[in-house]
């Protein structure tokens, strides 16, 4: 463990005593030096929840002791993309845990405008609101239609959250694909229409499921080969949702003629864009279950072990740190 200085807050900022903080795939990319947006040195951690420890003198909406989370993405609100409300594409974007001190620490500071009350959600569940907000932003990009059929590659934490969200958004069926049988079992428990082991999804099987292809195919793995294969499962006019994070230098070959001939749509969704309220509402309304996605909660003093579990443990889903655990 390293000692870091407690963040100083400005007049419009909130100091949050962190209770739970989740490990994201992005954290692992930053740890390995393969995430171009990171500014080193940096304290990692952008999925978190906690309690308000102090407020700046101009803060009106929060008081010490409130249970909160925060959007880690801090746009400038003045560049051309912010003016177009593309806040996640801000030219001067700061991100807690990426370019500013994050939540793998006892305290983290955030502007009041980025802080959200969590009500009676557990701190562990509330630390998953940021990933869910990313899914919600992607759904807005994809513009899923009621009755759409969907195929999702990857039944990890993000794939499971995505599956629940698209079902509540009106998808007629959601087929999940993964290498791990226990993850597929969890997907079925939470509503998946059908599940398949990765090596069992043959062309004949796909034809039986969707003779003309799926309306939406989503990648939640970040594996380039999976994204390449995803094109073959789309119906004419279908949408490929690129959600999983690949390495920056990854490349995927595709046939431009097929995109042209079939009127295909390739849709990316980066991070989130002011979608925390929707995520919170989905959870409070009972539409999304967060607790089943959490597999490990370790004390922050076991930081190295936590990273190891998040990257290599075959039984992992979402791995979190309990910051004040002994």
Image: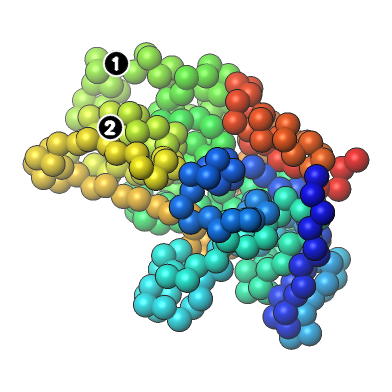
Q: Which residue lies under the disc numbered 1?
A: 202
Residue found 28% across the figure and 32% down from its top: 228
State the image coordinates of residue 13 (x, y, percent, origin top left): 71, 75
- Give yes or no for contact between labels 1 and 2 (Cβ–Cβ under 8 Å): no
Q: Gap between marks 1 and 2, in whole Å? A: 15 Å
Q: Quadrant of the C terminus?
A: top right
In the rendered image, the residue lying farthest to the bottom is: 58
Secondary structure of residue under mark 1: loop
On the rendered structure, is 160 left or right of 53? left
From what the image shows, is residue 249 above or below residue 205? below
**Front in this rendered view, residue 226 or 137:** 226
Q: Which residue lies under the disc numbered 2?
A: 228
On the rendered structure, is 241 left or right of 303? left
Q: Quadrant of the N terminus?
A: top right
**Front in this rendered view, residue 52 or 34:** 34
**Front in this rendered view, residue 189 or 62:** 62
């Amino acid at each position: 463990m390293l000692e870091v200085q407690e963040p100083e807050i400005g007049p419009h900022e909130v100091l949050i005593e962190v209770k739970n903080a989740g490990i994201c795939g992005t954290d692992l990319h930053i740890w390995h030096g393969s995430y171009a947006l990171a500014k080193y040195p940096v304290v990692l951690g952008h999925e978190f929840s906690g309690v308000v420890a102090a407020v700046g003198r101009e803060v009106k909406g929060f008081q010490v002791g409130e249970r909160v989370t925060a959007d880690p993405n801090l746009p400038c609100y003045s560049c051309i993309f912010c003016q177009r409300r593309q806040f996640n594409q801000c030219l001067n974007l700061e991100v807690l845990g990426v370019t500013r001190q994050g939540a793998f620490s006892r305290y983290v500071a955030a502007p009041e405008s980025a802080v959200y009350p969590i009500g009676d959600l557990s701190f562990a569940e509330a630390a998953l609101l940021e990933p869910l907000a990313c899914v919600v932003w992607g759904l807005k990009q994809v513009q899923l239609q009621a009755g759409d059929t969907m195929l999702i590659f990857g039944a990890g934490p993000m794939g499971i959250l995505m599956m629940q969200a698209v079902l509540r958004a009106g998808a007629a069926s959601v087929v999940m694909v993964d290498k791990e049988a226990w993850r597929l079992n969890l997907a079925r428990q939470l509503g998946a229409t059908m599940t398949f082991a990765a090596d069992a999804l043959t062309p004949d099987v796909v034809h039986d499921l969707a003779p003309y292809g799926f309306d939406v195919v989503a990648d939640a793995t970040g594996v380039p080969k999976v994204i390449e294969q995803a094109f073959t499962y789309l119906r004419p006019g279908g949408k490929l949702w690129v959600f999983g994070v690949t390495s920056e230098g990854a490349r995927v070959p595709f046939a431009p003629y097929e995109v042209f001939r079939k009127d295909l749509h390739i849709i990316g969704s980066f991070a989130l864009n002011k979608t925390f309220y929707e995520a919170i509402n989905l959870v409070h309304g009972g539409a999304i279950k967060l607790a089943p996605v959490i597999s490990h909660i370790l004390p922050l003093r076991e930081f190295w072990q936590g990273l190891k579990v998040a990257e290599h443990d075959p039984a992992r889903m979402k791995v979190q740190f309990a910051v004040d655990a002994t």
